[in-house]
Amino acid sequence: MLPHLSLPAAIVDSAAIDWTEHPRFHSIGMKALLTAADNPLAGVNVVQVPTDGVIGRHLHVKEIETVYVLAGQSVLTLADADYPFAAGQVVAIPAGMEHALRNTGADTVELLCIFTPPLA
């Protein structure tokens, strides 16, 4: 059973949020749309990876990261295997699995990233 959500519902306009540089990955843009303060069950970010940009190998200890590609072409590394990853595709990355992403196309890659539970 899900815990009772006592927070008020809020609509977030991503256009009203400024892009910031990702705290760990240089030149990667992000917008935090929903955080643990908004939803104790999930966090939502939009991420931009420029042409030739890379999100380096990393893992999330307790969060499942679900990534939907809004735009662009990339290669997603899961553990030690590479997969083409392009607009319209989605993946759920288990907690503890190392992963990375590399933009391989001519356009910016844009990702919708959902973390369950939200990042701390």
Image: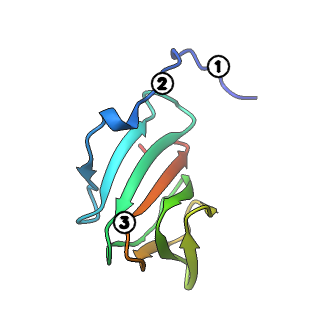
Q: Amino acid at mark 3?
A: Thr
Q: Which disc, if any, is residue 11?
A: 2
The answer to whether residue 55 is left or right of residue 81 is left
Is 17 located above or below residue 73 in the figure?
A: above
- The amino acid on which the numbered mark 1 sits, given as a three-letter code, is His
Which callout, 2 or 1, points to the residue nearer the camera?
A: 2
Is the residue 79 above or below the residue 94 in the image? below
Q: Quadrant of residue 106?
A: bottom left
Image quadrant holding the N terminus, namely top right
- Which residue is under mark 3? 108
Q: Which label's residue is closer to the chain start, 2 or 1? A: 1
Q: Position of residue 34 (x, y in %)?
A: 44, 35
Tag on residue 4?
A: 1
Between disc 3 and disc 2, whose residue precedes?
A: 2
State the separation of the CA atoms marked 3 and 1. Answer: 38 Å
Task: Classify 10 Å Cα crowding around label 1: few (below 14), some (14-19), many (20 and above).
Answer: few
